[in-house]
């Protein structure tokens, strides 16, 4: 468990799977993900069994000070040799627009740089996800490229943008 300001990142437990599945299956969430497949309860449990074995990822539930579910955060593709990893976050529908994402990314960056001793943190975002892009840029991420027309949504192909922040930039910020 990692506490930062008024949020807690707690390793994913089975009791949160239905909250996670409901969030994941909501169209306002999956429209901005690489994978748009809806998930059944059985698939979610099977996925969770695999996640528990994955040594290159950390899945956290995001909780407020009263331990209410706020969303899900992940650290993935942990590369201990090159000191790099990817981040992802989905905030509960009713909690969006309240500054939670900024707090969670601050917590994830602190944990990644100050505790995991990572040098480079990266993420990918659909070009159409303007709210997320603004959050990443305010959090210190810099655009470093794009995967042109990589994701298909609503009858058209959309660019997938690549962002990163280095430890030296994080420390300077």
Image: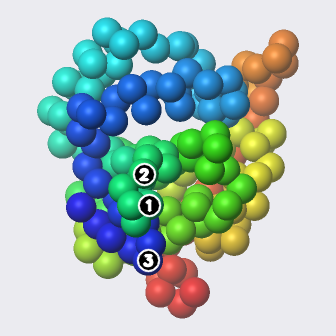
Residue at (36, 13) in percent of width and height: 41
Q: Secondary structure at mark 3?
A: loop
Give the crowd class for mark 2: few <14, some 14-19, many >=20 residues within 10 Å. Answer: few
| 37 relative to 131 in the view: left or right | left
Please give the residue where the numbered disc 2 appears in the rendered image.
68
Can you say whether 87 is above or below 99 in the image? above
**Residue 89 in the image, given as x and y percentages of width and height:** 51, 48
Please give the residue where the numbered disc 1 appears in the rendered image.
64
**Residue 70 in the image, given as x and y percentages of width and height:** 49, 50
Can you say whether 97 is above or below 46 in the image? below
The reply to whether the C-beta atoms of the residues labelled 2 and 1 are less than 8 Å apart is: yes
Query: What separation in Å lies between label 3 and label 1 (alpha carbons)?
Result: 10 Å
Quadrant placement of the N terminus = bottom left
**Residue 24 in the image, given as x and y percentages of width and height:** 52, 28
Query: What separation in Å lies between label 2 and label 1 (alpha carbons)?
Result: 5 Å
Can you say whether 99 is above or below 12 in the image? below
Disc number lying in front (3 or 1):
1
| 165 relative to 81 in the view: left or right | right
Query: What separation in Å lies between label 2 and label 3 (alpha carbons)?
Result: 15 Å
Residue 74 seen in the current view:
yes
Q: Which mark is drawn over residue 5?
A: 3
Would you identify the image quadrant in which residue 20 lies? top left
Q: Which mark is drawn over residue 172?
A: none
């Amino acid at each position: 468990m990692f506490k930062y300001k008024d949020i807690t990142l707690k390793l994913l437990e089975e009791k949160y799977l239905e909250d996670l599945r409901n969030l994941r299956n909501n169209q306002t969430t999956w429209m901005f993900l690489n994978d748009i497949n809806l998930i059944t309860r059985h698939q979610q449990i099977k996925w969770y069994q695999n996640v528990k074995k994955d040594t290159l990822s950390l899945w956290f539930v995001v909780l407020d000070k009263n331990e209410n579910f706020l969303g899900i955060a992940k650290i993935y593709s942990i590369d201990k040799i090159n000191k790099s990893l990817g981040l992802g976050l989905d905030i509960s529908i009713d909690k969006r627009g309240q500054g939670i994402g900024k707090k969670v990314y601050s917590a994830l960056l602190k944990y990644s740089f100050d505790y995991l001793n990572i040098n480079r943190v990266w993420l990918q975002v659909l070009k159409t996800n303007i709210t997320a892009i603004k959050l990443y840029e305010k959090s210190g991420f810099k655009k470093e490229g794009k995967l042109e027309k990589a994701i298909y949504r609503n009858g058209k192909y959309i660019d997938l943008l690549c962002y990163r922040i280095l430890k030296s930039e994080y420390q300077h910020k």
